[in-house]
Amino acid sequence: MRDNDGQVEHIYREKTDRRILRKNPWKDVRLHGTVLVLVVIAELIGTITIPLSHDVKITIMPLIYTIILGLAFYLVKPIKWIHRKQARIAEGAMMLFIGVLIAKLAVSSGQSIALIFDMGPALILQELGHLATILVLPIALLLGFKKESIGMTNSIGREPNVAVVVDKYGFNSPESRGVFAIFIIGTVIGTIFISFLVTFSLSFLPLHPYAFAMASGVGSASMNAAAIGPTLAAFPGMETQIEAFAGFSNLLSFCVGIYIVIFVALPLTEKMYNWFEPKIGRDSIVKTKEDD
Amino acid sequence: MPDFIDGSENVSVHGIFNWILLLLIFSIITVIGNYLGYKHPIGDSFIGMCILSLITLVGVWLERELPFNISSILYISVMGIILAFPGMPTSQTVLYYVSHVELLSIVTVFLAYVGIGMGKSWDEFKALGWRAIVITILVIAATYYGAAIVAHIVLVATGVPAV
């Protein structure tokens, strides 16, 4: 083991590498077999849409089934073949699989470079508007979060943001627990919440129609879809433009958003944390538990 | 200078072999899900996954091989962007095959592993409770309003008429 004076990345790397590089993680038929079964079940059920009213509908996508079923398989007692060992391998393997996700996003970025230049400054600058999440950090501190708040408030906490935070701080860090919490809660309630939020804002905020369209691209396909519905209904006759801006803005949030998070949002959130924490930080509400 | 440490280390042949087999398993499961969910042809989407896996493999290998303390995410992103950049000789092929792999198919498989790996931290998740729900709602609202307000200001400033 090399001496790496507090380099978080390398500490986690040592740990996951031991599981992934020195053992034979691919041999765990129980784990990969279970994942295959979960994915088949999830894709066969498919996306379920439950309309609540004319504009508001809940969309539940296969990715929500696999994360919840995966967690359930670990927690539920009658399922005997998924233990801590499988969870550890899953965790280590996940660090590698993030790469595939990032590669897919990168290919999309490369492909749409010309479009990014064409669509003008508004589309790109509004991505910086996402930094507003950092304003929530003091509230998180007042509610008793510690380093979790860095993971929670650096971004909206969707898949690419989770990947970035986990890669930077390690799977078992408080920052990652924070971003996972936002991810899970956002997955469950985000879609319906944003439908209501958009409906409400359209009636009360006198903003440019295109601004509403661009803002709906928050970086989550299901939330994007939920936000477009009421926007289209509010501006009849502008369907094409609204769909184009909303779709492209979401694509931007996925590909460019990552770099804003890596280079701007995370460093800024850490600075805010270091400045605010001694002033308004409370006792941690999360009991720290040593892993292994 | 704590930021500039030698991040390189040797990865054994056995380790690289493990990476390749894991990525192969991941690709097979993703292709099955991608076929069931989106009816993309199995052959084309498997080649797409092989391209993405290869980019990943080179990325994680570079992270350990090169002496810079740079995350594999950046190596992978740069390679993906360059390979798909319009005008690059690789872009047509890469785009054709990778477009047959839906992002959501990858995410679905990825999240199954996340779900299982997360089980270990369940008790701490429970401790996050209602406070985390409050923060989630505020974070989503802040993202939406932040983007909407900046977009509005730029649109008005650049003189885009509010049709």
Image (tube, rainbow, N blue to C red):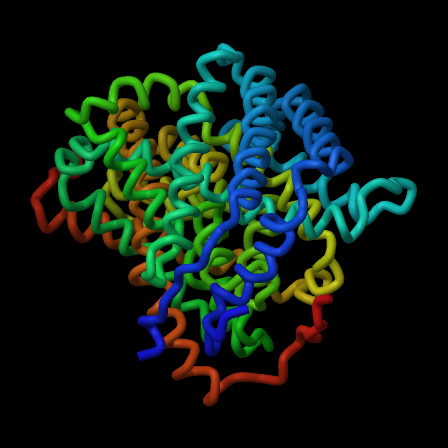
Can the viewer see residue A213 in this picture? no
Residue at image position (33%, 47%) is B75
- Residue A90 point in image, percent of width and height: 66, 46
- Residue B115 point in image, percent of width and height: 67, 45
Residue at image position (13%, 34%) is A118
Examine the rendered structure and indicate whether residue A118 appears above or below residue B117: above
Q: Quadrant of residue B82?
A: top left
Describe residue A145's horizontal placement relative to residue A239 as left or right.
right
Q: Nearer the viewer, residue A117 or B114?
A: B114
Q: Quadrant of residue A214?
A: top left
Residue at image position (33%, 38%) is A106
Q: Nearer the viewer, residue B106 or B29?
A: B29
Q: Nearer the viewer, residue A2 or A133?
A: A2
Can the viewer see residue A21 in this picture? yes
Examine the rendered structure and indicate whether residue A20 appears above or below residue A134: above
Residue at image position (80%, 43%) is A82
- Residue A279 point in image, percent of width and height: 46, 89
- Residue A168 point in image, percent of width and height: 45, 61
